[in-house]
Image (cartoon, rainbow, N blue to C red):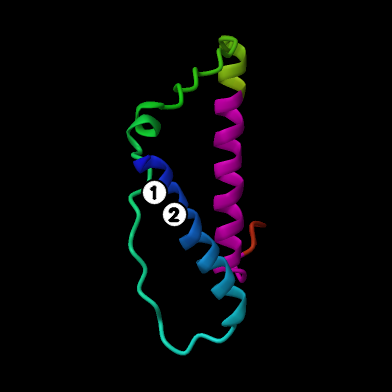
Amino acid sequence: MAKKARKAAASKTRKAKKAKAPASKKRSTAKTRRKIAGPKKTKSAAKKKPARKPVARKPESLSHKIADAFKAVVDTLVDAEQLHHKLEPEISREPE
Protein backbone atom coordinates (compact mmCIF):
# COMPACT_ATOMS: atom_id res chain seq x y z
CA MET A 1 0.00 0.00 0.00
CA ALA A 2 2.81 2.36 0.80
CA LYS A 3 4.23 2.01 -2.74
CA LYS A 4 0.89 2.86 -4.33
CA ALA A 5 0.54 5.92 -2.13
CA ARG A 6 4.02 7.13 -3.05
CA LYS A 7 3.42 6.52 -6.74
CA ALA A 8 0.12 8.41 -6.62
CA ALA A 9 1.75 11.34 -4.82
CA ALA A 10 4.63 11.38 -7.28
CA SER A 11 2.35 11.34 -10.30
CA LYS A 12 0.33 14.23 -8.86
CA THR A 13 3.47 16.33 -8.40
CA ARG A 14 4.60 15.52 -11.94
CA LYS A 15 1.25 16.57 -13.35
CA ALA A 16 1.33 19.76 -11.30
CA LYS A 17 4.80 20.62 -12.58
CA LYS A 18 3.79 19.97 -16.19
CA ALA A 19 0.76 22.21 -15.84
CA LYS A 20 2.78 25.09 -14.39
CA ALA A 21 5.62 25.00 -16.92
CA PRO A 22 3.75 26.23 -20.04
CA ALA A 23 1.95 28.99 -18.11
CA SER A 24 5.12 30.86 -17.12
CA LYS A 25 7.15 31.83 -20.16
CA LYS A 26 8.98 34.73 -18.62
CA ARG A 27 11.44 34.14 -15.80
CA SER A 28 12.10 37.13 -13.64
CA THR A 29 14.39 35.48 -11.09
CA ALA A 30 16.75 32.58 -11.34
CA LYS A 31 15.36 29.51 -9.68
CA THR A 32 17.66 27.24 -7.78
CA ARG A 33 17.46 23.61 -8.70
CA ARG A 34 18.53 20.67 -6.68
CA LYS A 35 21.60 19.01 -8.12
CA ILE A 36 21.21 15.41 -9.13
CA ALA A 37 24.24 13.16 -9.04
CA GLY A 38 25.05 11.81 -12.47
CA PRO A 39 26.31 8.34 -13.28
CA LYS A 40 29.82 7.57 -12.14
CA LYS A 41 32.49 7.72 -14.82
CA THR A 42 34.68 4.94 -13.53
CA LYS A 43 33.75 2.60 -16.35
CA SER A 44 34.66 5.06 -19.10
CA ALA A 45 38.02 5.71 -17.49
CA ALA A 46 38.75 2.01 -17.51
CA LYS A 47 38.11 1.74 -21.24
CA LYS A 48 41.24 2.98 -22.92
CA LYS A 49 41.80 2.93 -26.63
CA PRO A 50 44.48 0.48 -27.64
CA ALA A 51 47.72 2.03 -28.78
CA ARG A 52 48.28 2.02 -32.51
CA LYS A 53 50.90 -0.34 -33.74
CA PRO A 54 53.58 1.29 -35.88
CA VAL A 55 53.29 0.56 -39.56
CA ALA A 56 56.01 -1.82 -40.63
CA ARG A 57 57.99 -0.21 -43.44
CA LYS A 58 60.23 -2.00 -45.81
CA PRO A 59 63.87 -1.47 -44.88
CA GLU A 60 65.55 0.99 -47.22
CA SER A 61 68.41 -0.26 -49.28
CA LEU A 62 71.84 1.31 -49.03
CA SER A 63 71.45 2.96 -52.43
CA HIS A 64 68.21 4.66 -51.34
CA LYS A 65 69.86 5.93 -48.16
CA ILE A 66 72.79 7.35 -50.14
CA ALA A 67 70.45 8.97 -52.67
CA ASP A 68 68.37 10.58 -49.93
CA ALA A 69 71.48 11.91 -48.17
CA PHE A 70 72.83 13.30 -51.47
CA LYS A 71 69.52 15.05 -52.20
CA ALA A 72 69.53 16.58 -48.72
CA VAL A 73 73.08 17.92 -49.21
CA VAL A 74 72.24 19.35 -52.64
CA ASP A 75 69.07 21.02 -51.28
CA THR A 76 71.06 22.57 -48.43
CA LEU A 77 73.71 23.94 -50.82
CA VAL A 78 71.05 25.36 -53.18
CA ASP A 79 69.29 27.07 -50.27
CA ALA A 80 72.59 28.50 -49.02
CA GLU A 81 73.46 29.83 -52.49
CA GLN A 82 70.04 31.48 -52.86
CA LEU A 83 70.36 33.08 -49.44
CA HIS A 84 73.83 34.34 -50.29
CA HIS A 85 72.57 35.98 -53.49
CA LYS A 86 69.63 37.45 -51.64
CA LEU A 87 71.83 39.04 -48.99
CA GLU A 88 74.61 40.25 -51.32
CA PRO A 89 73.16 40.71 -54.84
CA GLU A 90 76.06 42.95 -56.07
CA ILE A 91 78.69 40.21 -56.11
CA SER A 92 78.70 38.17 -59.31
CA ARG A 93 80.11 34.69 -59.82
CA GLU A 94 82.06 35.58 -62.97
CA PRO A 95 85.74 36.44 -62.50
CA GLU A 96 86.80 39.89 -63.79
Horizontal side of residue 30 vs 93, given as left or right: left
Which residue sits at x=34%, y=42%? Answer: 2
For the residue labelled by badge 2, is the local secondary structure a helix, a strand or a loop?
Answer: helix
Q: Position of residue 10 (x, y in %)?
A: 44, 54
Residue contact at pointers 1 and 2, CB within 8 angstroms: yes
* In this rendering, position of residue 86 left or right of residue 48: right
Q: Is residue 75 magenta?
A: yes
* Quadrant (top left, top right, bottom left, bottom right) of the C terminus: bottom right
Residue 83 x, y percent position in the rendering? 56, 59
Please report the residue visible at 58 percent of the width from the left and 53 percent of the height from the top.
Answer: 81
> What is the magenta range?
68-91
User: Residue 37 versus residue 17: which sits nearer the camera?
Assistant: 17
Three-letter residue code for mark 1? Arg
Image vertical order of residue 11 relative to residue 75, above or below: below
For label 1, the crowd category at 10 Å Cα-Cα, with few meaning under 14, some 14 to 19 and many 20 or more, is few
**In the depicted view, which residue is nearer to us: 80 or 95?**
80
In percent of width and height, residue 25 lies at 59, 83
Place residue 51 in its image quadrant: top left
Q: What's the mark number on residue 6?
A: 1
Q: Label 2 neighbourhood size at 10 Å, few (<14), some (14-19), many (20+)?
A: few
Q: Nearer the viewer, residue 47 or 71?
A: 47
* Percent x, y of residue 29: 42, 87
Seen in the picture, residue 79 relative to 19 is either above or below; the reply is: above
Which residue occupies 43% across, 43% down? 4
* Quadrant assignment, res 40: top left
Q: Amino acid at mark 2?
A: Ala
Q: Is residue 5 magenta?
A: no
Residue at the spot of label 2? 10
Q: Quadrant of the N terminus?
A: top left
In this picture, is 39 found above or below 9?
A: above
